[in-house]
Structure formats: structure tokens, C-alpha cells
Amino acid sequence: MSLLSVTDLHVFYGNIHAIKGISFEVNEGEIVTLIGANGAGKSTTLNTVCGLLHPRSGQVVFNGENVTKNAAHQMAGKGMVLCPEGRRIFQQMTVRENLEMGGFTRAQGDLEGSMQNVFDHFPRLKEREKQIAGTLSGGEQQMLAMGRAMMSRPKLIMLDEPSMGLAPILVEQIFEIIRELHAAGATILLVEQNAQMALSIADRAYVLETGRITMSGEAGDLLQDDAVRKAYLGE
Amino acid sequence: MAQFLEALVNGISLGSLYAIIALGYSMVYGIAKMLNFAHGDVIMVGGFAVFILMVSNGWQPLLAVIAAMFICTVLGMLIERLAYKPLRGAPSLAVLITAIGVSYFLQNAAQLLWGANPKFFTILDYGNLTVHIGDSQFNISIGKLLSVAVSVAIMVGLSLFTGKTRIGKSMRAVSEDRGAAQLMGINVNATIAITFAIGSALAAVAGAMLVGVYGVQLSPTTGAMPGIKAFTAAVFGGIGSIPGAMIGGILIGLIEILVGTFVSTDLKDALTFAVLIVMLVAKPTGLLGKPMREKV
Ligand SMILES: Nc1ncnc2c1ncn2[C@@H]1O[C@H](COP(=O)(O)OP(=O)(O)O)[C@@H](O)[C@H]1O
Ligand SMILES: [Mg+2]
């Protein structure tokens, strides 16, 4: 059953037609990846799905409910969370406070359990619990951003370029954690410029080019596709 | 020595009054990212509310202040809802001009309702405390001491609120990154409304102190000067920063009284602003203002 289904989405920035009628879906339990060059419209797509932007036309259906016109702050409570590009953690708050904000929609009594779950995946965050988030390293900040997103125990986690700006060893770690989250039952929509990594972890993939989906299919098939290899895997 | 101590106490007391006004500017700036120019006029409305309730209706001071806080809270939330919320996302110049418009609107409405003649108000005289140091002695007004105590209690309460409570923390989150806060499920509009409510309640307390303790005469423009001084204090401390507003308020109060006592009363405002300018040249974000850091 499809958890997220996007139909014929058009998004504009003023006169700029950034998303030109895309449709895709994410089924429960899948990792789906959206790959594409810088400026293709990946972030715009995720921001529209979670309500930070609103489409001029088209539909977003989440968990059987039409959420196209919903405000962003309503989505966390419905079980959808975006871990945004550039992490956007609350720099001046502590690690623990950041996680508390991630669990804002949960009952106070649920917070400890959610936090424990995050610390199980990211023991590093436990060590840094009281530290001001802005003083963390880039890799730790990405972990915090992901942990914060997990705090609401979402049905769907959307990750916008989680590997951006990280050293290769940290990229490996982040993808390992995405695998773990998936194994623990999370449905994941992953946006990446690192197409090699994204395709190797995903079940299915869509290729976005200047606001249009130009290819889609099993991630393994796209990984073998000549055009994809040429355009996105640097061959 | 005695004169210096007296000036010091008066400066701290005036400064703590500026501090609670500055908190209103700074919190609203931090969270709604706008300068609420009408904040000073909410102080004036609070002053009139206390005056009318006590003088005309014979209410007890404490009850009158609580009622004034309620009135100003409602007023502040109404201003936000009717004048500022429709402009969310509009260019900041449009918001600023609207805020100036709201300020004139409140002053004119006050003039219509209560007339332009200044009213004096000297009900809250709690007497003086005489302090002896060696041979010299000086007086401290107990009313002013009380107002310092109230201000300190407000500052401590507000620090605990923003530091420890769920809503207080969500206000800090909104002030840092509105979009990210929304993704957490935080309702930004509701958070901004709460901020206006708190700032306006504080304005009512400030209005009560101004007319009740400091003997400022009450007229439709009463809020303007303390409003500008407190705004200066908020910028001085680093606008958007809560501890910055507190420290900025107290420093501006101290500078004003010390300059007024030892240099010249005519120069006190000019010198206060000169100190502000020097400070901003040295540190453009204000005393505790943090530049936005990006870490990759
Ligand atoms: N705030 C904005 N205002 C105007 N144009 C924008 C804005 N954000 C993105 N765009 C444009 O929309 C297109 C898609 O951008 P984006 O979704 O950020 O791409 P990606 O995430 O794939 O790199 C780009 O051409 C970009 O220049
Ligand atoms: Mg992007």
C-alpha cells in the first residue's frame, strides 16, 4: 500500500516553474530515493510534500489523507518528518533540547522512550547530551538532525542530502544508520546527490531533471543503466 | 560617596524598568522578526488602565495592575492578529510602517478616549528608606525598591520559562529557525501570539511602574520616550537576546542616571545614545547578540 503518493505536482517560486508536473509514490517499508543534479528540484519537492511550500496544482496524499493544503506544523503529528538540507539544527540549544523539540508533538511521557531509542542509534549524542548543538562537529550535527527527526516516531522520514559536506567515512556511517532505521521498520524517502550510495541502499529510485522525472525503476536496475551511470555516477 | 550610591540605586531601578520594556521588544524581535514600534504605546495604555481603575474606580493597586496586564495582553494579541499577522512574509519595511501606524493609532485613540491633558498620579508613595554611610546619608524610595524586586522576579521567571518549559523552548526554536521549528510540529503563528501576549503583559507592568512609582505624567505620548530608551537597551544588549535585554536595560538606566547626576541633565539622553553608537561600532550585534553561524 502506498504511504505517500504525489500526483502531477507543479511548484512555482514567483514566476519560476521549479517542479513541472511530477508524480511518484513511496510504499510502506520502502527506501525510495530521488536523485538529480544540483538545482533539479529535489529540495523543492520535499519541502512541498511536508507543507513548507504549497504547490500551484497537484496532490499530496499521505497515509490515505489529502494533505496538499496542510501547514508544515501539522505534518509531524500526522507521522511525516523532513530532515532538511543543511541539517538546520537549533544551534544555540543543547543536544537534548533539540531532541525535545523533535518530540514536540509527542506526549511528555513518551519523550524519554523516544530519546532512548535515538541514543541507541547514536551513542555519540548521549555523550554530548548537554552540549550546545552549534559546537558539534559536522557529522555529529547530521546525527542530531536525524535523531531529532526520529523523535516524533514518524511513519515516513524524508532525508534531504544527509551526506552533504561530510567526509567519506562519515558518509558510510550515515548510510549505515539509514539501513538500521529501515531495518527497524521506517519508510524512507532519500534525496541525494551521491547517487552511487543512494542507489545502492534504495529499493526504488526516481531521477529528477530540471523539475521533471525522467527515469524511474528498481534502484538496482538504475545503477546498471548506462545513461544514469554517465550522468550521475561520473562514468 | 552617598550621592554616587544614591545614583547607583536609582540607575539600577530605572534600568530594571527599561529592562522589562526591552524584554518586550527583544522577544518579539527574536521570534516574529519585527520591530513592534507600538510597544511603547501599549505601556501607555497600561498606565491609563491602572490610573483609571485606581483613581476613578478605587481599585487596590495590585488588582488594578493585574487587570491592566489582562487588558494589555488582549490588546497586544489583537494588534498582532489584526495588523501584523496579515503581513507575515511581507517585506520588513511594510511591517515597520504598519507598526508605526499602529503606534499613532493607539496614541490618537488614547487622546480621543482620555484627552490630551497630562494627568498626575501620586498614589503609590510607600515612603523612603534612609541609608547611613559614615557621616553621610541618602534616601531610597521604597516604591523604587519594590519595582526593582518585581522586575527581578519577572526576569527570573522569564528565564525559567524560556529555559525549562516546553512552550518556552519552542519559542527559542522559532526564534532560531522558523522553518525547522515548523517541521518539528511547532505552530509558529501560535508561538508569535504567545510572545505578543507576554510582551504586552510586561508593558502593562512597566506602565504601572512609570505612572505609579516614577511619577511620570500620563498622556497619550507617555510611552514614547521610555519605549525608545528601552528599544535602545534591547539593541545595546543584542536584540533578540533575553539576557541581553535585561543587561542592556540596566546599563542604559545606569548611564542615564549617572550622566544626569554627575555630568549634566541636559546631556543625559545625548550621551546615552552616544554610548550606544560607540558600542554598536565596536560590536554590531550588541553585547550578547550572536552572529548567525553556519557549520558545514
Ligand atoms: N527560494 C527560492 N526562490 C527562487 N528559486 C528557487 C528557490 N529555491 C530554489 N529555487 C530554484 O528552484 C530550482 C530547484 O531548486 P532545489 O529544489 O533547491 O534543487 P535541488 O534540491 O535539487 O538542488 C532551482 O532552479 C533553484 O534555483
Ligand atoms: Mg537541495
Image (cartoon, rainbow, N blue to C red):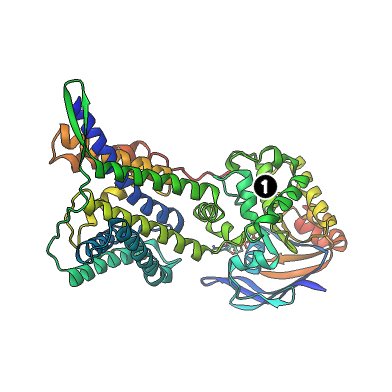
Between residue A199 and residue A74, name the one nearer to us.
Answer: A74
Residue drawn where x is 58% and y is 70% of the image:
A71
Q: Is residue A66 above or below residue B110?
A: below
Q: Quadrant of the C terminus of chain B?
A: top right
Residue identifier under label 1: A144
Between residue A102 and residue B147, name the one nearer to us.
Answer: B147
Residue drawn where x is 35% and y is 46% of the image:
B151
Q: Please, which residue is most extreme toward the top here?
A: B134
Tag 1 secondary structure:
helix
Q: Quadrant of the N terminus of chain B?
A: top left
Tell me where residue A37 sits by quadrant.
bottom right
Judged left or right of residue A152, residue A228 is right
Residue B204 x %, y %: 32, 58
Residue drawn where x is 23% and y is 49% of the image:
B213
Amino acid tagged 1: Leu
Quadrant of the rendered image holding ligand 2: bottom right
Tell me where residue A135 sits by quadrant.
top right
